[in-house]
Image (spheres, rainbow, N blue to C red):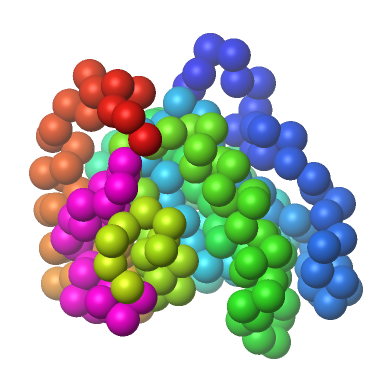
Amino acid sequence: MDAEQESQANPYGMDEECRNCPELCETRENVVHGYGDVGADFVVIGDSPSRGADASGVPFTGEDERGLLDVLAAVDLCEDPDAAEPELAQTFLTYITRCRHPERPATDEEVRTCEPYLNSEVRMINPELLLPVGQRPLEELAFEYTTLSRDELDIGERHATTIRGRGFEILPMIPPAEQTDAERTAFLEHFSDVLGQDYRQTKGRRGR
């Protein structure tokens, strides 16, 4: 944890009363901004808040998304995945959209409206690795951070591999609730190999 960081929850003080998407203002409980270590080497990016995250205001919490914290705990990046506010190491959790609609996924317009939040978090944290969870987060990273088109990025094919991006490496993950045991094992083995590399010696030295 950065010595100057006061809280893991929304550490950059982003607008918690955001009303940029009027329809979502009527259905959400919380605007779920990023959570975690502002000195993180790894930024995990999901699609949009689940019911549990919407209720708690903390990304990837609740039974419907709990598997992501279990994965992080397995590689010693999350101390207590059952906690209401889990303690994370070198990790920041966020979404491409910040509000939940209980009956549908976010629209393309809603994703575009939220882009400044995500881009600001990634820019300020300046991580070494981006971990998109699911197809849509992977596609949203394609234009900004890779030379690949969306058509070349299939989450099933790219799961547990490393994509060399522009300034970042990207490690895609099938959502844990949709993974087979073999896919979970493959991801944990690959991520453990990645963690064995000493990113901390190079953090901040590369030109972006």
Q: Nearer the viewer, residue 163 or 102?
A: 163
152 on left or right of 8: left
Q: Residue at x 66, y 21 (%)?
A: 6
Q: Nearer the viewer, residue 127 or 103?
A: 127
- Segment colored magenta: 150-171
Q: Can I make out residue 74 in this image?
A: no
Q: Is residue 183 above or below residue 55?
A: below
Image coordinates of residue 163 in percent, x first then y, are: 21, 57
Which quadrant of the rendered structure holds the C terminus?
top left
Image coordinates of residue 181 in percent, x first then y, are: 19, 72
Residue 139 location, quadrant: bottom left
Q: Is residue 201 above or below residue 186?
A: above
Q: Can I make out residue 105 in this image?
A: yes
150 on left or right of 187: right
Q: Is residue 160 above or below residue 81?
A: below
Image coordinates of residue 39 in percent, x first then y, are: 45, 26
Residue 101 lies in the magenta stretch:
no
Q: Residue at x 45, y 73 (%)?
A: 136
